[in-house]
Image: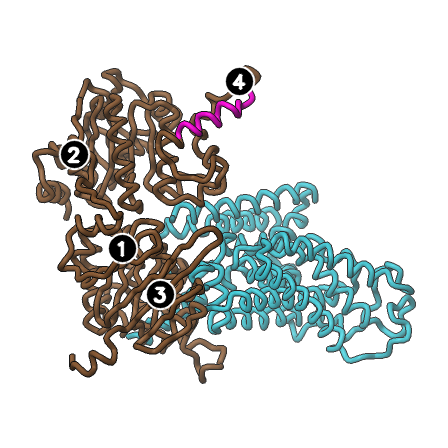
Chain colours: A brown, B cyan
Amino acid sequence: MHIGEAREVMYVLEMNHVSKSFPGVKALDDVTLKVKPGTVHALMGENGAGKSTLMKCLFGLYSMDEGEIRFNGEPVVINNVKEALSLGISMIHQELHLIPYRSVMENIWLGRFPRIGGAKSPVVDHQTMFDRTDQLLKELNLSNIKPTDLLRTLSVSKAQSVEIAKAVSYDSKIIIMDEPSSSLTENEVEHLFSIIRSLRQRGVAIIYISHKMEEILKISDEVTIMRDGHYVGTWEASELTTATIIKRMVGRDLTHRFPSRESKIGGELLRVENYTSPNARSFKNVSFTLHKGEILGLGGLVGAQRTEVMEAVFGLRLHSEGSLYIRGKEVTINNSYDAKKYGMALLTEERRATGIFPVLSVQDNLVIANIKEYRDKSGLLNSAKMAADTQKSIKDLDIKTPSARTLIKSLSGGNQQKVLFARWLLTSPDILILDEPTRGIDVGAKYEIYVIMQELAAQGKGVIMISSEMPELLGMTDRVVVMSEGRVAGTVNSKETDQEQIMELATKYVG
Amino acid sequence: MSGRRVKQMRTQAIGGFLFGKKSLKEFVMDKAIFLVLLMLVIVIAIINPRILRVQVLRDILMMSSTKIIMALGMMFVILTGGVDLGGGRMVGMAAVISASMLQTSDYVRRFYPELGQIPLLIPILLAVIVGTLFGMMNGMIVAKFKVPAFIATLSSMLIIYGVNSIYFNMPPNNSQPIGGLRPDFTYLGSGSIGFIPVIVIFAAIVSIIVWFILNKTVFGKNVYAVGGNPEAAAVSGINITKTLVGLFGLCGFLISLSGVLEAARTGGATNNYGSGYELDAIASCVVGGVSTTGGVGTVSGVIAGVIIFSFINYGLTFVGVNPYWQNIIKGIIIVSAVSFDIRKYVQKK
């Protein structure tokens, strides 16, 4: 790059002194973001730090109260999505914005189909659309996707590639990616990174939002950190470590990402033997044991059928063979009522889809699994008792909510997760199954969740945690059962193992 | 290569409803309700084979024609995940408006006793414009005030019926059935060119135009996009309000056109014309594979759905099934069609 040129367009994007208030909250306070062309710029911060708000201002979804945006050095005003797109700014949202029953090419050119006979013509030019899509996919090395494929037939990873291709088709200079790796397997993340690298080579700047430190350090050139709506700073990624990022994100030293503890492991609590799914492609001959006071990790790649096994243990899925023992006694669990009766609780992976009741209050969400216990003699619900338990839960788990009447959907992800914890704790379970309990939760809240898990184990309960985050598995559990392609590949002691060994087991039956 | 593929895709779009590339099991699952009804058709034909005479089939086709036009209108709304409950009343209104101005000059009880022989097109256009405007109003309410389509159209159903009844009750008509329609008008509904009924030609032309709009135009693709994932449509810079107003307007246009033709076909009109037709249209769409969750549906599917539904309607009477039982059978068909449809999408999720 010439020095003169560098001075001219040092930054493809500058957001200077941006402030934005919502009723009662100052979401952004004098925030700065400067992105160089052809770089991957990570934007980090806890949930609620204002990353999304900042991006929405950039993408024309929110209007800024104060501040300016400079694009290629020129001040610009972005009033809506269309203006952002035509400037060359696009966004890959966390929930993919694609239309399932339409073809890849239609999804890509949505809103700007090529037309037969000029821009005003109402008729779509399919041939041109096909050719352009074909070329675009080839350029991005996505030849395994056909322009005429229906979106719903594609995997999540391919669908995301389509979104990226769409962003590229806008001739974007900046592509914002919001948690793009959250539902991808490791291989798919590698593929995503290779696409990102090729975009970077084409001079596209990527603003990369993620909670995964390892990923950020691997892919990004620069990192901007935000905290509570404030700008903390921008650093070269090479200057940073996981620890320094966390420190700057939370504004305090988190010397330990995981609380330390002494495990007191007691007798056998749950034993699963030879659980096999009637579906041949699902789990097979799965056996493991959970002890009192133990945190048992369940590791493996996405698609290793970990969730399926646990759902079968909880009675939500069928198993054709196998037996289950609780405290040494064989029991049959065919549905979730049975599971609850035997003192089991399950926190599902998809918090929004299968966890919370978004438009019900925090209190309603808390007591729902235990609602029968609140009936008095007449069979009516005792509101005073429900309110008292709710207050206690809010206090015990330090749930940050304006009141018990607040709708749960307005809480942050971490606090929603705490409410779900509290919901199951009210049923006084002995065995807690946690499916990716910290997914999409910021660092501070993660730590609090870990503390809760530790406390439960200290009380002599058994905890099973499915997790795809390696550090979490190693840092939080006593033992890890590693699954591969529906089978148990091995069980390791967390203190004596490392990432490599777990990865090796996780890929044991792959391919 | 690429040209061939586009062509292949096009033929799939045309014939995709029946001949899509799928495994047999998937095919059966996809078209379960369709196949069940096809069996019912066969049973009816076995009980009374006379239903397969050309004359009878032609009758069924004529009966289906206005319903096809109406169901195609309904399809636009269902594609966005809504329904138009006011459709039946809109048929009544269009029928009354057009019929009221198209009576023969020697008929005794004329709606407008002094009205001369006006060009055929004027009352028809008037009826269709009023219908289109009501449709656009529905679209506006859905788009701007975020009122669910079934509530918006429930209200317009009442309003349309009220407006139509007031018009119908105007002296000197005083709510008398409108009859004595001009032969050039009734020709549209019951005439034929050679052996082919004019009304069937109407339905065919409308079907081709609707097919073209849905598959070849930007507007049509936007309809599928808004129905399939409104957020995706919004972030792609599609004007959702414009699309909704457009498609509801088109729905109003097609439904009122079917109302006009219904008056021409039956040779009369009252304010109660068309009552309940919207349910038949919705049922036909669903049977024909238009998903109530939005974003999925083809013209060929809707046509097949209407014809099968009409055949069963006609056939049950033909083989002497008690009309009360017919209602029960129709109810079962609708609920099973929707539950099959929902099951299909839930499973694939």
The disc, 1 or 3, on the residue closer to the chain's N-terminal end is 3
* Amino acid at dot 2: Val
Which type of secondary structure does the marked residue at label 1 adopt? strand
Q: Name the residue that disc number 4 marks.
A: A376
Which type of secondary structure does the marked residue at label 3 adopt? strand
Instruction: Specify the segment rendered in magenta.
Output: A379-393
> Where is residue A235 drawn, in percent x and y?
19, 61
Q: In the image, is residue B29 above or below residue A390?
A: below
Q: Is residue B54 at least partly visible in the picture?
A: no
Q: Name the residue that disc number 3 marks.
A: A17
> Where is residue A2 drawn, in percent x and y?
16, 82
The disc, 1 or 2, on the residue closer to the chain's N-terminal end is 1
Which type of secondary structure does the marked residue at label 4 adopt? loop
Looking at the rendered image, the disc whose residue lies closer to the viewer, 2 or 4, is 4
Q: Are marks 1 and 2 on the same chain?
A: yes
Q: Name the residue that disc number 2 marks.
A: A480
Looking at the rendered image, the disc whose residue lies closer to the viewer, 1 or 3, is 3
